[in-house]
Image (tube, grey):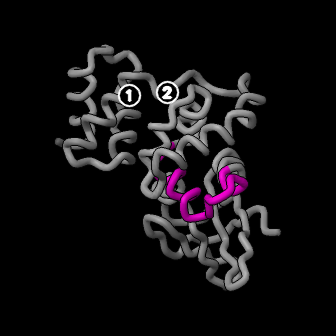
Amino acid sequence: MIATLEGQLAQATADSLIVVVGGVGIEVIAPYSTTEKLGAGRVYLYTRLVVREDSLTLYGFGTVAERDLFDAVLKISGIGPKIAIAMLSTLSVDHIRSAVLNDRPEIISRVPGIGKKTAQKVVLELQDKFARHLDALPADPEDDTSGELIDALTALGYSVVEAQTAIQQIPLDAPSDLEERLRLALQSLGG
């Protein structure tokens, strides 16, 4: 099993990386949350090797939490690596935890390729796992205002990832008024 990978980043796209280790370029499939944070130079990834009958695919993550969530999602019947990577590319680990613990499958259903029934299944299957780790969880980042902001920004044509990134840029001391928060989010998006 390949648990970690460290090497020189040779190429990065939105969903994969080429990491040169000992002169060999290794392709690593990674969520957008990982690929967007990496710059040129040395990279360190937590990895999971998925063995299929016709392929060996290495998946890489910037944090142990992302890798652990990937593993947990793969244990859900009917969900494969593509959907697990899509979840981590669309929603942060904290947003997924919050959606699961607060029984909000509509947040999970924002992930491309996940419908309402699958989202409900994900929430149900992951609740026990997350409930055991409640003391390590941050406060709920997906409050009603954030949900409304994501809906408003996606209605304006921004992706869920862009919307979440913009919301994270809003200062903590910003007013809780939805219109003001929307203005600040649009400002950070350059719109």
Element at label 1: helix
**Depth check, front residue: 163 or 5:** 163
Instruction: Please tell me which residue is depicted at 53% across the width and 75% down the height of the picture.
Output: 10
| Farthest-out residue, left | 191
Q: Quadrant of the C terminus?
A: top left
Relative to 95, say whether 21 is above or below.
below
Amino acid type, label 2: Pro
Q: Quadrant of residue 44?
A: bottom right
Query: To which quarter of the image does residue 163 belong?
Result: top left
Name the kind of residue labelled 1 in the image: Ser
Q: Which residue is mark 2?
A: 141
Relative height, residue 17 to residue 79 (above, below):
below
Label 1 or label 2, whichever comes before in sequence order: 2
Of residue 128 and residue 174, the one placed in the foreground of this image is 128
Residue at x 48%, y 53% (from the top left corner) = 114
* Residue 120, quarter of picture: top right
User: How many residues crowd around disc 2 within 10 Å: few (fewer than 14), some, or many (20 or more)?
Assistant: some
Magenta range is 73-91
- Asked whether residue 87 is drawn in magenta, I would say yes
Looking at the picture, how far across and down is residue 183, in whole percent?
Answer: 20, 28
